[in-house]
Amino acid sequence: MSELYDAILNGGAPQAAEATRQALEGGATALDLVRREMVPAMDEVGRRFECEEYFVPELLLAARAMKASLALIRPLLASSGAQPAGRVVIGAVKGDLHDIGKNIVASMLEGGGFEVIDLGSNVAPEKFVEAVRTHHAGLVCLSALLTVTMPAMRATMDALDAAGLRGQVKVMVGGAPVTGRYADEIGADGYGENAAAAVALARKLVDT
Ligand code: B12
């Protein structure tokens, strides 16, 4: 693993940005860095958290380092002005502050040619409804990392339904505790395990 992996694991934001710059200059692609360094580093952070080697402060530092790197990578993943493949509203559901995976999905969707409206984290159902209306989005992506925030996905589905928008938007869900079965249960149109799967599924959903 490279310096970027270590920088994220050690929570060094300036080091992560520098390692990202160097790797890009050395010819690495943005996608390579996400897949081979950033996601594995956050997986390791998660593992250390689970076995109590890391605590919340370390998580926050790692997340900050990841963001510093993502800020440099994001523009490279975004498409170069071609006709958008579709318009997507994305956010982490109400109560959920985890936004790293959601940010990666958003960046990859941009890289896949979608126009992405990122509502951030802790997004209330009515905010999703408002954004779909305002931006005439064809796809909504909901992210949840906590089992206790998964019900907010269902609440968001219900809010879209109550607003009469369910017929015009597809909904895709994801996040570590979310499963395909849960997606079916709440009536979502699809579930993606990771950012690459999210892009493939988004393409499929906007085509149907
Ligand atoms: C970083 C982190 C934090 C950071 C978040 C910083 C940030 N800005 O995001 C901080 C410190 C804030 C945090 C806080 C908490 N956390 Co936390 N956190 C994590 C950790 C270590 C990593 C998450 C992460 O970023 N993973 C890396 C990314 C790349 O992966 P990902 O998010 O899964 O996303 C990928 C896929 O899931 C998918 N995906 C994600 N979203 C979507 C959406 C769609 C539409 C699609 C298709 C795909 C998709 O694609 C992504 C890219 O491949 C996880 C452990 C883990 N291993 O997951 C715990 C974890 C999620 N946290 C946990 C907990 C308990 C908490 C706290 C309650 C802790 C506390 N006691 O305060 C709080 C809750 C805060 C809140 N209200 O949200 C638990 C959740 C347990 C559960 N099942 O409910 C975990 C699993 C740790 C654990 N084992 O205990 N956390």
Image: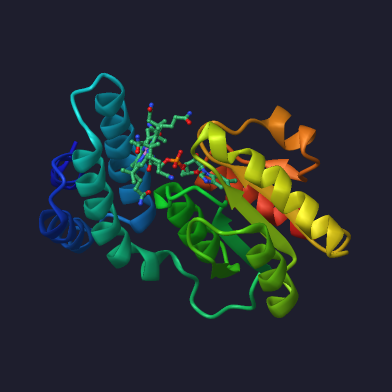
What residue do we see at 39% from left, 50% from top? 100
Question: Which residue occupies the extreme top position in the image?
Answer: 51
In x, y percent, where is residue 102?
48, 52
Residue 6: quarter of image = top left
Q: Can I make out residue 13 in this image?
A: yes
Tell me the quadrant of the picture where the N terminus can be found. Answer: top left
- Left or right, residue 161 beside residue 90: right
x, y (%) of residue 191? 66, 40
Give the vertical position of 143 relative to 115 (above or below): above
Res. 208 in view: no
Q: How many marks?
A: 0
Snapshot colouring: rainbow
Q: Nearer the viewer, residue 64 or 109?
A: 64
Residue drawn 66% across the image and 45% down it: 153
Question: Left or right of 37: which side holds 118?
Answer: right
Q: Nearer the viewer, residue 144 or 109?
A: 144
Compare residues 197 and 138 and report the one nearer the observer.
Answer: 138
Residue at 53% in and 80% down? 81
Q: Examine the image and state in which quarter residue 123 appears.
A: bottom right
Q: Is residue 7 above or below residue 166?
A: above
Image-based side of 17 in relation to 105, left or right: left
Which corner quadrant of the image does residue 27 belong to? bottom left
Q: Position of residue 193 (x, y in %)?
A: 56, 36
Image quadrant, ligand 1: top left
In the figure, is residue 153 to the left or right of 39?
Answer: right
* Residue 66 image offset from top left, x and y in percent: 27, 52
Check the picture and name the quadrant holding the C terminus.
Answer: bottom right
